[in-house]
Image (tube, helix red, strand yellow):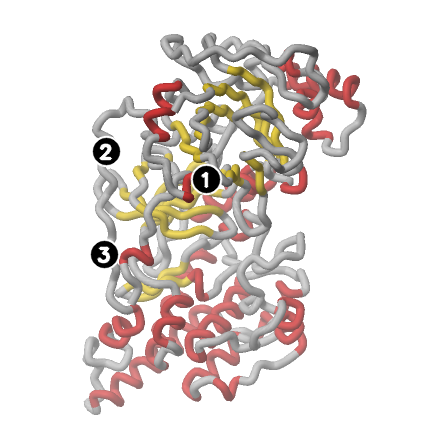
Amino acid sequence: MRSTTEVFQPLHADDPPVVAGYRLAARLGAGGMGRVYLSHTPGGRPVAIKVVRPELADDPAFRRRFRREVEAARRVRGAYTAELVDADTDGVPPWLATLYVPGPSLTEAVARRGPLPVPAVLWLMAGVAEALQAVHAAGIVHRDLKPSNVLLAADGPRVIDFGISIAAGLSSHTATGSTVGTPHFMAPEQAVAGEVIPATDVFALGQTAAFAALGEPLYGDGIAPVVLYRIVHEEPDLTLLPEPLRPLIARCLATDPGERATLAEVVEWCRRQLDADADADTGTGARTGADAGAGPAVWREVTGPEATVPQPAPAPVDPSTPATTLLLSPARRRAPRRRTALITVAAVTAGALVLTGLTWLAGDRFGLRERAAGAPASTPGPAKLAPAETPRSSTPAAGTPTAGTPRASKPAPNALAASGADVLSPVWLDEKNSLSLREPRLPKDRRGDIRLDCEDDADCALRSDTSVFVQLFNGKTASLAACRHLLTGATGSEYRTWSLAAADAGTQLCVKNASGDIAALTIQVKQTALREAAFLQLGMYVWEDAA
């Protein structure tokens, strides 16, 4: 049995409380596509909100595929699918909402209780086959059917994430050679980069059913190349399976896609076998339903007791409080004329760059700071500061700063004067340097207190050993009073990492270090799509000894 705390995790410090009007009640998990949250429709029905990772959202090709697949997924209507109810493919970041399925995944159910009984496997295969019929009727090939994409509800299985893996350009392998999930459920034609057709999903159905019956992959464990070689060149050992399941699974796993069973044949075969089992159980030749071998009692034992779904998140009492909602806006489009001008200046200043698509951004680092700070159309200015807030004055160091060294500059036109605050804009942060709230504020090594980290298996994030981060939502002004208020309760280690997954140009956050200094950071430019060249351009206000 999965406890409520295992299924529904509390929101983390870097999770938004609201996504496009959906108030988030809990975190459900995270994966290669992004993070998944529990929310509710206005009428109170639970939904799963999936927010796409920025590394994918920054890719124009992904957005085109994602938009196409979401439109196709809207047409899918099936008793054994998790219906898509809402989405914004042009949002920043993109997101989608499906009906929430209360039940464990097949992977979790097998880990909890071991292999499923034969009647449960037959019911599973019939339900998943019917779901795939609905998916294929909408013009979609799932491509990534596997135990973790099959949820076990009280009234039968549900197939999720149909069509989404192709939008991400992912199945079980990626072009980078890293594994996303497992290769154990790929068809031979997928393993050799051949044509993917509806019969490809039938092979995955056979693999998934074998996993349910055995409690482990039919083609064994091992590294991806070894398993894929077996799938392409070797016949599976079907004697490991319960005898009643062997004929059907063997047809699903035919190497030639044309020889595989059709989904209609799978459904019919399972229903005939379930009826025969029911007749044998009752000895009367008549099916009794709940008392039959594949009845609700068997399925309920497989799925386990349902975890209690949290109630809808309450509406904020005072909408004017700083941390209330994440506003997801359509993707921004920069004026071509302005971008062309900046590219030209950057080329003259810095020479040819490898990442030509980022040339205008690189120009800001190589001597165009004043111009960037004074160009709100292409570079958002620092966070606005209420004029009533007057932290103590600080005097910039004398002398002319050298290239690559942060220096105080006047705020962008859309920011009010911050008397007494140290103002640095723009500030460049990447995985080679770091940031501190006291001098030296931008060391060229990683010895500063705030670092940009982009790990291979996690979101890019800001990390610190001693400072804490809290994000400002709903477009609130990054004043000293607001930051003081929000940072009061930020005392745990979970506040020392701030994910950039949902961040965008204009995102603001408050920072406090162990010395009591407070800063307001505004993201002006974010590039995390290419992790090896990830960077942030920030606007930064600092109040020393202000906590």
In primary-sequence order, the first of circles 1 and 2 is 2
Q: Which amino acid does label 3 sit on?
A: Thr
From the viewer's perspective, tell me whether residue 474 is left or right of residue 55: left
Q: Identify the element where label 3 is drawn.
A: loop
* Residue picked out by circle 2: 315
Residue 501 visible somewhere in the drawing:
no
Residue 334 image offset from top left, x and y in percent: 59, 21
From the viewer's perspective, tell me whether residue 500 is left or right of residue 29: right
The CA distance from mark 1 to mark 3 is 31 Å
Nearer the observer, 421 or 203: 421
Residue 481 image offset from top left, x and y in percent: 35, 19
* Residue picked out by circle 1: 496
Residue at image position (47%, 69%) is 205
Q: Which amino acid does label 2 sit on?
A: Ala
Q: How crowded is mark 1: few (under 14 residues within 10 Å), some or many (20 or more)?
A: many
Q: Identify the element where label 2 is drawn.
A: loop
Q: Which amino acid does label 1 sit on?
A: Arg
Relative vertical location of residue 121 with respect to residue 368 in this rendering, above or below = below
Residue at image position (57%, 26%) is 525
Q: Do the residues labelled 1 and 2 touch (CB within 8 Å)?
A: no
Q: Identify the element where label 1 is drawn.
A: helix
From the viewer's perspective, tell me whether residue 310 is left or right of residue 547: left
Quarter assignment of residue 476? top left
Residue at image position (80%, 27%) is 352
* Residue picked out by circle 3: 308
Which label belongs to residue 114?
A: none
